[in-house]
Image (tube, rainbow, N blue to C red):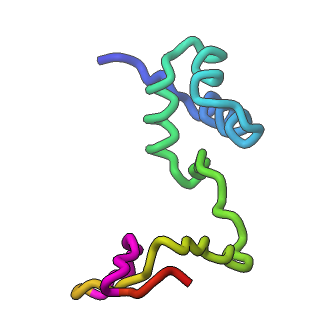
C-alpha cells in the first residue's frame, strides 16, 4: 500500500497558500505533485478549502436601458405570450409614424 501523500502538515500549508490566492497548479508545483491531487485534496477537505468562484459577480441592477425603437418594426405578442419585434407591414400596421 502506498503511503499517504497529504499529511496534516502539508494540508495546513496548502490551506494557507489557498487562502493567499495561489492556484491549484501553483500549490502542486510547490509540493511536487499534480494539479488534480491538490484539487481532490481540497474537495475532500471542503471545510478548509472554500470554493473560489472564477465568475465575476453580476453587475448591480440599475435602471434598465431604454429599448431601441425602430420605425420600421413593431412589437407583437405571440400566442405563448412572448414579446417579439417584427417588420412593419403597412397594410396591417398602417404607415410608419
| Residue 83 x %, y % | 38, 81
Tell me if 27 is positioned left or right of 19 in this view: left
Q: Position of residue 14 (x, y in %)?
A: 65, 32
Q: Is residue 78 above or below residue 72?
A: below
Where on the picture, by quarter, is residue 86? Answer: bottom left
Residue at x 63%, y 24% (from the top left corner):
27
User: Does the magenta segment cover residue 71?
Assistant: no
State the residue lying farthest toward the right. 20
- Is 56 situated above or below 14? below
Residue in view at x 59 percent, y 34 percent: 8
Residue drawn 46% across the image and 83% down it: 95
Q: Quadrant of the C terminus?
A: bottom right
Looking at the image, which is closer to me, 61 or 19? Answer: 61
Image quadrant in which the N terminus is located: top left
- The residue under the point 58% across, 29% down is 24
Residue range highlighted in magenta: 81-92
Query: Could you tell me residue 41's position as x and y percent?
Result: 48, 36
Camera-side residue of 92 and 22: 92
Q: Residue furthest left?
A: 79
Residue 74 % position (x, y): 44, 79
Amino acid at each position: 500500500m502506498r503511503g499517504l501523500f497529504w499529511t496534516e502538515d502539508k494540508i495546513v500549508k496548502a490551506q494557507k497558500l489557498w487562502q493567499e490566492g495561489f492556484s491549484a497548479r501553483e500549490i502542486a508545483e510547490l509540493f511536487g505533485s499534480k494539479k488534480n491531487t491538490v484539487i481532490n485534496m481540497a474537495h475532500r477537505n471542503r471545510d478548509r478549502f472554500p470554493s473560489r468562484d472564477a465568475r465575476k459577480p453580476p453587475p448591480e441592477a440599475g435602471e434598465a436601458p431604454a429599448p431601441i425603437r425602430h420605425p420600421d418594426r413593431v412589437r407583437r405578442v405571440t400566442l405563448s405570450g412572448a414579446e417579439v419585434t417584427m417588420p412593419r407591414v403597412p397594410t396591417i400596421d398602417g404607415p410608419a409614424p
